[in-house]
Image (cartoon, helix red, strand yellow):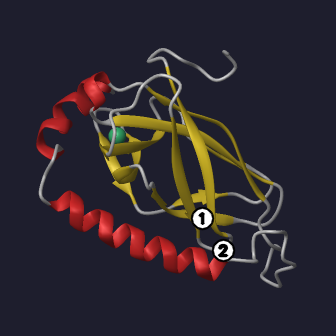
Amino acid sequence: MSAVHGRTVLGFRRTALTGAVLATALGGGAFLAACGAGGQEGAAGGAAGGAARLSVADSYIPLPPAGGMAAGYLTVRNDGGEDQLVKVTSPGAGSVTMHRSTASSMEQVDRLDVPAHGTLQFTRGGTHLMIMGWQKAPALGDELELDLTFAKSGTVSVKVPVKELTYRPGQS
Ligand SMILES: [Cu+2]
């Protein structure tokens, strides 16, 4: 996967688009956050399947080479009804996208299912986040805020630690 990312970064790095993407992301994020305000504390939703009850665990970002494009991984646990992750943004990075690895490449996806009473898992070689346009080059021990927007649950913010390139969850 890193070979693919390494090739891709050349095309994406520091394009003039970054500013526009950031502005759009921030505007949309603020709107959705406002919509979701007050709805995250277990609102008794009447939707079929009940309200989703989400928590995020095992999040990490392997330290990217020379502050370039990074991958991000996390697990969304859901103790309630189904939901979907529809957008990820960060105040510290110009672009965060959701990707799915295929046999030979990867593709960007617009939404990812969070099954009822199940998990949405980002893993190496599988579904992952791609983080570009760091405002400040990441270093080990840094934390990047990610704002995860869900179709029903609104926006959930998490602080994701930057770890060694070889880190796996469960290691300290
Ligand atoms: Cu990718």
Viewer-proximal residue, 116 or 143? 143
Identify whether 150 is placed above or below 16. below
Quadrant into which the N terminus falls: top left
Q: Which residue is mark 2?
A: 152
Q: Is residue 153 above or below residue 68?
A: below
- Residue sitting at x 42%, y 63%: 110
Mark 1 CB near ligand 1 (8 Å cut):
no
| The label number, if any, that marks residue 84 in the structure image | 1
Q: Secondary structure at mark 2?
A: loop
Which residue is farthest front? 136
Q: Earlier in the sequence, mark 1 or mark 2?
A: 1
Q: Amino acid at mark 1?
A: Gln
Q: Nearer the viewer, residue 113 or 20?
A: 20
Q: Residue 138's spot in the image, x, y percent?
A: 39, 31
Local packing at callout 1 (Cα closer than 10 Å; few below 14, some 14-19, many 20+) is some
Residue drawn 83% across the image and 56% down it = 79
Image quadrant of ligand 1?
top left
Q: Amino acid at mark 2?
A: Lys
What whole-number distance in Å separates the C-alpha atoms at marks 1 and 2?
7 Å
Judged left or right of residue 46, residue 87 is left
Q: Is residue 122 left or right of residue 120?
A: left
Q: Which residue: 13% across, 52% down? A: 15
Report x, y in % for residue 112.
53, 58
Check if mark 1's residue and mark 2's residue have beta carbons within 8 Å. Answer: yes
Say whether residue 130 is left or right of residue 84.
Answer: left
Would you identify the image quadrant in which residue 172 lies? top right
Q: Nearer the viewer, residue 171 or 94?
A: 94
